[in-house]
């Protein structure tokens, strides 16, 4: 057996990353902001498994997509089941709808990790987190506007301003087949100029060529016919109402007839929001669209639907690029740190008393020196320290001290132990740091 020192330490797998405090506070803020916006429009939280039957994604997202065809994490479990780690959440939400048949309209939001075997780079990971929402039932364009508006409100609530919202309509079962054939014919005439993969796979699904990132395909696609010019009357009317609704809502958008998204299930409205500050290939911070045939294709009754999802990692990059200070809006800091040199259980008892009163309190562990504990109190960021020594225990008091006012601060006051909570609340109010009651949210709104 090799010596222990010759083992290299394990690292997070390529394309994944650990998010530690305090950076994770920014993630909490994004999730809490999204939940607030979603709740405000009557969307409820949904949790679905991280792995699903492989066939769900194969059928739901489309085998010709990169997401399914190239990037899926597939696995066979010990029972021989063919499973996949979810590459996105919409297919799972629709599967849950078909399985449980909740009443319509059904409005849900989610937050969680997804997995795609992509080439890792800034803003592109193999495990990445999304927040998103889905609404099933209405085919009303008012829903399209609601979802795009909520996406917009979420980014605005984070302070993002340099955004580019593009919308498009991909038609429906009525007008898409004719467009698909027109596109196939156009591309077939130029087959030799396409990338090798699409020269071969063009006939399976010509729409996927529109989404190809390779230069030869991009050049050919520049002159290709667009679905928007061939929409049927119903789709054209729907798209017109979406545009009107967004204008009324004051959401700035532009129509981009070349916008196609990487998943096959979209019908009619699709949209994408890019962060102009990111200035890179990885600038899409969110997107979504209608999927009016997905429920049916997964075995449910004909039920229209629409959704939106946004990558947390990318959104954080965008906030950074716009210079938004998320740290100061993140989880509220500690109220008080308990320094205990009495050596008994009094420190833990007082800490418990403070926490049960709804104060955010921490304590030092082990029998560290007074100096060591004050250092820990300083590092914790708490504005106040409670000090407990043998004298305080004997007298039924605690010492209360303001932190961050310089070493050797003399302003330690003695407070009767029964009054400690009231006194701390008073001190916090004076320093404008509102204490948080036990039932309040942990995020600043
Ligand atoms: P999609 O599910 O492909 O529609 O992507 C929705 C959003 O998820 C994108 O706009 C990105 O913000 C984010 N996203 C997608 N793929 C990745 C990835 N590999 N790494 C990080 N974020 C991603």
Image (tube, rainbow, N blue to C red):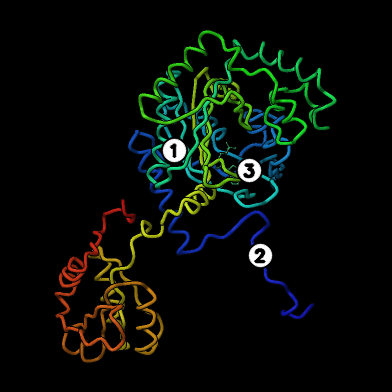
| Vertical arrangement, residue 195 with respect to residue 79, above or below | above
**Element type where label 1 sits in the image:** strand
Residue at 43%, 48% in the rendered image: 31
- Write down the quadrant of residue 83 in the picture: top right
Marks 1 and 2 close (CB-CB < 8 Å): no
| Vertical arrangement, residue 70 with respect to residue 416, above or below | above
The residue where tag 1 is placed is 109
Residue at 35%, 78% in the rendered image: 377
The tally of labels here is 3
Residue at 48%, 43% in the rendered image: 131
Indicate left or right for 369 with 166 as reference.
Answer: left
Query: Neighbour class for label 2 at 10 Å: few (<14), some, many (≥20)?
Result: few
- Write down the quadrant of residue 196 in the picture: top right
The residue where tag 3 is placed is 281
The residue where tag 2 is placed is 11
Indicate left or right for 37 with 69 as reference.
Answer: left
């Amino acid at each position: 057996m090799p010596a222990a020192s010759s083992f290299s330490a394990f690292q997070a797998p390529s394309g994944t990353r650990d998010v530690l405090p305090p950076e994770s506070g920014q993630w909490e803020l994004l999730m809490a902001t999204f939940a607030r916006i979603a709740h405000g429009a009557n969307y409820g939280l949904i949790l679905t498994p991280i792995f699903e039957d492989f066939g769900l994604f194969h059928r739901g997202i489309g085998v010709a997509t990169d997401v399914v065809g190239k990037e899926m994490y597939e696995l066979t479990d010990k029972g021989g089941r063919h499973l996949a780690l979810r590459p996105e959440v919409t297919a799972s939400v629709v599967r849950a709808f078909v399985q449980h048949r909740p009443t319509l309209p059904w409005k849900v939001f989610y937050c969680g990790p997804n997995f795609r075997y992509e080439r890792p780079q800034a803003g592109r990971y193999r495990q990445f987190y999304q927040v998103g929402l889905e609404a099933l039932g209405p085919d009303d364009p008012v829903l399209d506007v609601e979802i795009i508006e909520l996406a917009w409100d979420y980014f605005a609530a984070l302070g993002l301003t340099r955004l580019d919202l593009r919308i498009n309509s991909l038609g429906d079962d009525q007008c898409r087949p004719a467009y698909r054939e027109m596109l196939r014919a156009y591309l077939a005439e130029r087959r030799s100029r396409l990338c090798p993969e699409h020269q071969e796979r063009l006939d399976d699904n010509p729409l996927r060529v529109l989404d190809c990132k390779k230069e030869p395909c991009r050049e050919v696609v520049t002159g290709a016919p667009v679905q928007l010019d061939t929409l049927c009357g119903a789709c054209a009317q729907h798209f017109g109402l979406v545009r009107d609704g967004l204008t009324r809502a004051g959401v700035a958008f532009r129509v981009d007839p070349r916008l196609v998204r990487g998943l096959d299930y979209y019908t009619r409205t699709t949209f994408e929001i890019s962060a102009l500050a990111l200035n890179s290939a990885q600038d899409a911070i969110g997107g979504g669209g209608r999927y009016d045939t997905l429920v049916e294709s997964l075995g449910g009754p004909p039920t229209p639907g629409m959704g939106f999802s946004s990558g947390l990692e990318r959104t954080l990059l965008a906030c950074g690029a716009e210079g938004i200070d998320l740290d100061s809006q993140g989880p509220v800091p500690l109220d008080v740190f308990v320094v205990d040199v009495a050596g008994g259980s009094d420190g833990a008892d007082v800490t418990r008393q403070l926490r049960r009163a709804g104060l955010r309190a921490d304590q030092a562990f082990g029998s560290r020196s007074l100096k060591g504990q004050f250092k820990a109190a300083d590092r914790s960021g708490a504005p106040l320290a409670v000090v407990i020594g043998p004298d305080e225990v004997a007298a039924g008091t605690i010492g209360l001290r303001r932190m961050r006012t310089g070493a050797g601060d003399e302003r330690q006051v003695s407070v009767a132990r029964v009054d400690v909570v009231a006194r701390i609340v008073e001190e916090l109010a004076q320093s404008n740091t509102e204490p948080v009651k036990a039932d309040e949210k942990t995020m600043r709104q």
